[in-house]
Image: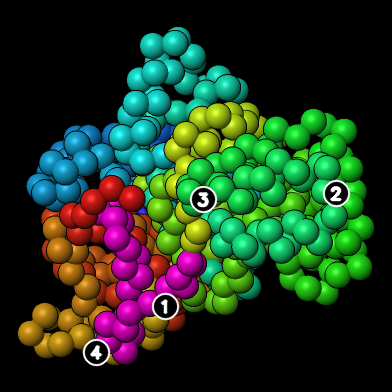
Amino acid sequence: MPILRLQNEIQRYPWGSLDAIPRLLRLSNRSREPMAELWMGAHPKAPSRVEIDSGTHQALGEFIAQDPERVLGPEPARRFNGRLPFLFKILAVHTSLSIQAHPTREQAREGYEREERAGIPIDAFERNYRDKNSKPEMIVAMGEFWALRGFRPLQQIRELLSILGCPEILAGAFEALGRDDEADAYDALLQALLDLPAEQADTLLRTADQIAQVKRREPLWYWVHELSRSFPRDLGAIAPLYLNLIKLRPGEAMFLPAGELHAYLRGSAIEIQGSSDNVLRGGLTSKHIDRDELRRILRFESTEVQIIDPEVVDRTARVYRTPVEEFELWRHNTPSLPAPKHLGGEPGAVTLETGNTPEILLSLDGYSDLRFEDRVLRLEPGESAFVTADTERYSVSGSAVLYRARVGNPAGDA
């Protein structure tokens, strides 16, 4: 059967939620461990497993490798060297992720080969590049979702830092903000803040938190206080003063290209990204921080954040398009309308076409029946399936919201 049920792994990072993923997947969490991400894909760190038949499973990457042209489609198999180019996730953030950015494909390839030559083990704490792939990503909010993303305008940063006082401590930052070249100004600002001596950084953090406690009804200062409380002595807590604070409402999306500084603060979301685990961190973490390498890959420019609303395709389908070739994301709402008769659709179902690319389907808030010829695979809430490219067409019915991850159209690097 070319539509195969998936078994997926949950990543239990400390910043994850205790109940968001268990609630979505209808799981128990008796151990009360944070569940941060559900991974759906073929990434070697935590590959999904396809159900070949009852009781028999195989890692998705191995399944693809047996016949990449059939499973991925001839063109995607050639374009992505026989690998699935995206990783699909449910993300559940309780405590902020690190301030981070991701490399372009060229930067990832160069960094990976450099660290290989240096003999740094792939699983070493200090390793920056764990593969040769880029990691553009898009999130779709499932509820209220808060994030930091991209630099604020220079004048706005100056005004916000001025509220802190501390002119001697911030002298280097204000000097940076006065530079003529915008990219140079952002680079120098970040370096000035990251290089503050520990005693001065502690003073600045105490001052910021005192102000934040007074002004915490304002979202910006609320997050300065929350980050100060969650990450004591970490200067990343004042990042809302120089990065844009973003609030996504349910169904709204945000695309993040390579080289853009960001952090996810709180909320649950659907995430789709390039199949990579390359992360350069700058704060709000106990993981490895390489500030020089982070600055080397960053886009030093003011960011005007664009919130993405899905494009309406028909009464049941919406698509979140992106400027990258690795992925696109669809959302289908059922109960479905009858499919057109010329497509052979079943009554009460919608017929979908793969377009010669592979798909991963995630059923939420209800069940989905996936029908191919005379066979039906039912997905309960939180379950997912892999659809091979050569399936061509299948029908969907049920009572769920169905998210559908697919390969995107050829485009430039993110």
Q: Which residue is mark 2?
A: 166
Marks 2 and 3 sit apart, C-alpha to C-alpha, by 24 Å
SS under mark 4: loop
Mark before the other along the chain sequence, 4 or 2:
2
Q: Amino acid at mark 3?
A: Asp
Foreground mark, 2 or 3, reads 3
Q: Residue at x 45, y 10 (%)?
A: 119
Residues 57 and 239: in front is 239
Quadrant housing residue 18: bottom right
Q: How many marks?
A: 4
SS under mark 2: loop
* Image position of 16 with respect to 141: above or below: above
Q: Which residue is mark 4?
A: 338
* Cβ atoms at labels 2 and 3 below 8 Å apart: no
Mark before the other along the chain sequence, 1 or 4:
1
Residues 107 and 383: in front is 107
Q: Which residue is mark 1?
A: 309
Marks 1 and 4 sit apart, C-alpha to C-alpha, by 26 Å
Foreground mark, 1 or 2, reads 2
Can residue 312 be found in the magenta stretch? yes
Quadrant housing residue 371: bottom left
Residue 180 badge? 3
Q: Residue 8 in the image: x percent, y percent?
A: 47, 48
Coloring scheme used: rainbow
Q: Which residues are magenta?
A: 304-330
Residues 236 and 204: in front is 204
Marks 3 and 1 sit apart, C-alpha to C-alpha, by 36 Å
* Image position of 348 with respect to 32: above or below: below
Marks 1 and 2 sit apart, C-alpha to C-alpha, by 41 Å
Mark before the other along the chain sequence, 2 or 3:
2
* Image position of 375 with respect to 289: above or below: below
